Image (cartoon, grey):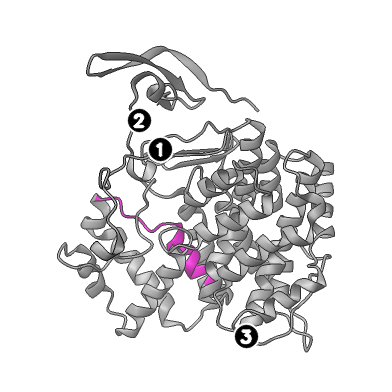
Amino acid sequence: MTSAVSESSKTARLVLEDKELELPVVVGSEGEVGIDISSLRSQTGAITLDEAYVNTGSTRSAITFLNGEDGVLRYRGYPIETLAEHCDFLETAYLLIYGELPTSDQAASFREDIRHHTMLHEDMKSFYNGFPRDAHPMGILSSVVGALSTFYQDSMDVHDPDQVEVSIHRLIAKLPTIAAYSHKKSIGQPFVYPKNSLSYCENFLHMMFSTPAGDYEADPDFVEALNLLLIVHADHEQNCSTSTVRMVGSSNANLFASISAGIGALWGPLHGGANEACVNMLEQITRDNGNVQKYVDMAKDKQNNFRLMGFGHRVYKNRDPRATIIKTSCDKLLQKLDLKDPLFEVAQKLEETALRDSYFVERKLYPNVDFYSGVIYRALGIPVQMFTVLFAIGRLPGWIAHWKEMHADGSRINRPRQIYTGPTRRDFVPVDQR
């Protein structure tokens, strides 16, 4: 693996009143250019202000390269298209976390370590009794993952590589079990224990859909589709939830607590909840007699607040490469199942309309990964509230990889600055005079 960040011979010159500062220019291995402002405040007393961090690099990372203008996504240098074609999710997870694709022996050992930790401590079942039946599974997921730290106090030292390693295995192994239990809780069915003879994706579907009254055998096309979805969601650079995991981890919080915080960030409808919002939109259009053109026109109307969910992307200014990968799987599933679900008809009409409408084409508002993943989850029989949970399972290796990288780099505790805009110094007034 080759990667490098170099200090360029070029510098950026900043002039502030009578002070002039030469700022180093940093160049990444893919040619990305950054201006190092770490000495700005100490030398000028000023800070930069970048609302929502859209132009601010928070770290140097060797994990994922993303070029939104050209629609490029690579994990550790490997194109996402190549990994989706040749690897399964656990191989991809290994790559992200350890930096290289595993040998056959390493892959076998990694899979065995994951199988060893799929069970939950029996006492953790009592947690589920305390949640309302209609509790959102993301709330359950975040809570139970955070609680893992209380059950596994033998792996809390963030500076002990062996303890970190067992925490990684426990999280990857247990997250599908925690997620499936939350679904079973919501429908009043008994929890289904993991079955370690099955693959990672097969095991999750088994825990979701089997019952003591009958076995469940996962359709190979279902397993393939789920595997693809987990791979394309496995990492996406410094997004909201990954940045959250890094920030919480920078305080030396244990891995369970850091991942729990990341799950909370992912829950937001502007982040991981977007695929759930997409299906809710499709259901809305379906209830309105499937009038796709009406909603397309509403989305184009600047005076209308309606937004088409699942189109365009904040980072990708071209096609989302992840959407291209899973569109094929989506089409394959819908053709195979031949489901008489009007929502799928609306989804296909909406896709066709947007791809040929000049308004969307000129603005490059293509269907994104949330659009197709929501449709696939629905086809697999996954309840809408579980969509973001599946996203969390997929994103887990990326979160872990960034948490590990942050500690390996000796990152200081994250502490953003601010520009204060409140009142200046005020005199105190006693309560009887206010």
Q: Quadrant of residue 336?
A: bottom right
Distance between the Cα atoms at labels 2 and 3? 52 Å
Q: Which residue is mark 2?
A: 47
Q: Quadrant of the C terminus?
A: bottom left
- Label 2 or label 3, whichever comes before in sequence order: 2
Magenta stretch prevailing secondary structure = helix
Give the amino acid type for the residue marked by disc 1 in the picture. Arg
Q: Label 2's element? A: loop
- Label 1 or label 2, whichever comes before in sequence order: 2
The reply to whether dot 2 and dot 3 touch (C-beta < 8 Å) is: no
What residue is drawn where x is 68% and y is 71%? 205
153 relative position to 357: left or right: right
- Label 1 or label 3, whichever comes before in sequence order: 3
The reply to whether dot 1 and dot 3 touch (C-beta < 8 Å) is: no
Distance between the Cα atoms at labels 1 and 3? 46 Å
Q: Which residue is mark 3?
A: 187
